[in-house]
Image (cartoon, helix red, strand yellow):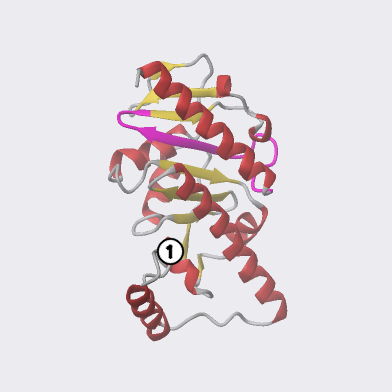
Amino acid sequence: MTESSNFTELRGALVQACHRLAAEGLFIGTGGNLSVRHGDVVALTATGAVLGEITPEQITITDLAGRIVDGELVPTSESPLHLGIYQFAPAEQVCAVVHTHSMMATALSVVLDEVPVLHYQQLALGGPLRVAPFHAFGSRELAMAVGQALDGRLAALMANHGAVALGSSLTKAVENALLTEWLCELYLRAKTIGEPRALTAEQLQAVIAAATASGYGTTRKAQ
């Protein structure tokens, strides 16, 4: 596969992911950004692009240092966040980053320091969702704070800002972003009824043991 065809494939995949997340309500206008890594290059949504209507021409290819390799538009202002994650995370574990200003995640980021585990599906993201302290968008300080919040996690919230989700593939990063929003909505809805009851450490260990024994979350042939 040629470099040009690689870029075309990356752009097409990123456009589809943007359109899907916009259709799910996680993107409003230009709020949010996506990226996907392939080897030593990263495809990033362009700054100012309306993500629900984004086109391949609005995807910029950079190297891991942020230098433009292909494309005519300036990449997202959150490039330091995306590139910082790729520089420190193993490529086989993280090859896509989704940042949203989704309603439920953003609402919780305004009032919480951490989203506890109310449902065992949250373990797929690593456990309680930490909330990174507020810093101006696009800043090195924000990138560092989010990196710390993501330690051992595949998702985190950003105080008074939004959420970020990672994945070993673009598809998995999109699914993790959707799961993050679902978990935040679950907490918010539960809180309107009463005090949410978080799962205990013992209950979480029991879930992990059951998932390991059953192969939970993977399809397999019946014996």
The magenta region covers: 25-41
Residue 189 location (% of width, % of height): 69, 71
Residue 172 location (% of width, % of height): 46, 50
Residue type at tag 1? Ala
For disc 1, the neighbor class at 10 Å (few under 14, some 14 to 19, many from 20) is few
Q: Residue at x 39, y 65 (%)?
A: 221
Residue 102 location (% of width, % of height): 64, 50
Q: Is residue 76 visible?
A: no
Q: Residue at x 36, y 45 (%)?
A: 94
* Residue 212 part of the magenta-drawn span: no
* Quadrant, the C terminus: bottom left
Q: Nearer the viewer, residue 152 or 158?
A: 152
Element at label 1: helix
| Picture quadrant where residue 69 is located | top left
Residue 150 location (% of width, % of height): 39, 54
Q: Nearer the viewer, residue 83 or 58?
A: 58
Residue picked out by circle 1: 124
Q: Residue at x 63, y 82 (%)?
A: 195
